[in-house]
Image (tube, rainbow, N blue to C red):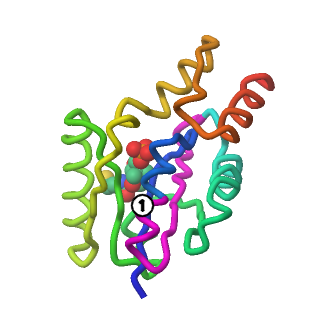
Amino acid sequence: MKIGVYPGSFDPTTNGHMDIIERASKLVDQLIVGVLNNPDKTPQLDVNQRVALLETLTKDLDNVIIEPFTGLLVNFVNEKKAQMIVRGFRAISDFEYELQLAQTNHMLDETIETVFLVSRTDYAYISSSMVKQLVQFGGDISRMVPKETERVLFASMEKR
Ligand code: PNS
């Protein structure tokens, strides 16, 4: 069984993330979306909210499951008996970081491959941090994120 892990912060999930999830799910028997729980960071949405949002957004994708993880990604990948890490690649600005991440993970465990899916050109400009900035200043994010992300994000802003 071919199992892939698509890891990320997903704070929040964007249309770009959803495109990668849908496409990656067709390449493997099971896709595990790994949601990083980093105790050193204060995300806009806590890990439970990020997991719940992704579960809602992927409910129609039968071979996709959502799981939080802490610590090293390669440990999570091995724990799940996965063989590959999937990452999205938007623009040249992603290159250095993604290369470093993939090479570090390969150094840590040579049996795990990182596979990159290039983003659709119309989603290439979308990032979670840009989405959060726009929401903070009342900008329109409707073309950047799914409706459910918009709802959850605005609700979390109101609570603050
Ligand atoms: O969505 P992001 O924030 O770009 O995702 C980054 C992520 C979660 C893939 C990366 O930070 C990660 O894998 N963190 C876990 C710790 C780890 O294994 N780092 C790589 C070796 S330094």
Front-lying residue, 81 or 86? 86
- In this image, 104 relative to 49: left or right? left
Please provide percent x and percent y for residue 123.
Answer: 40, 37
The quarter of the picture where residue 90 lies is top left
- Check the picture and name the quadrant holding the C terminus: top right
Residue 55 vs residue 125: left or right? Answer: right
Q: Is residue 124 above or below residue 66?
A: above
Residue at image x 56%, y 51%? 37
Residue occupied by mark 1 = 23
Which quadrant: the N terminus? bottom left
As drawn, the residue found furthest toward the right would be: 159
Q: Which amino acid, mark 1?
A: Arg
Which residue, as the protein is rendered here, is positioned at the far top? 137
On the image, the x and y values in percent for residue 42 come to 59, 34
Badge 1, how many Cα within 10 Å: few under 14, some, many 20+?
few
Question: Residue 26: x percent and y percent?
Answer: 43, 70
Whether 42 is among the magenta residues is: yes
Image coordinates of residue 83 in percent, x first then y, are: 34, 77
Residue located at (21% from left, 74% from top):
110
Give the secondary structure at mark 1.
helix
At x 46% / y 51%, what residue is drawn?
A: 19
What stretch of residues is rendered in magenta?
Answer: 22-43
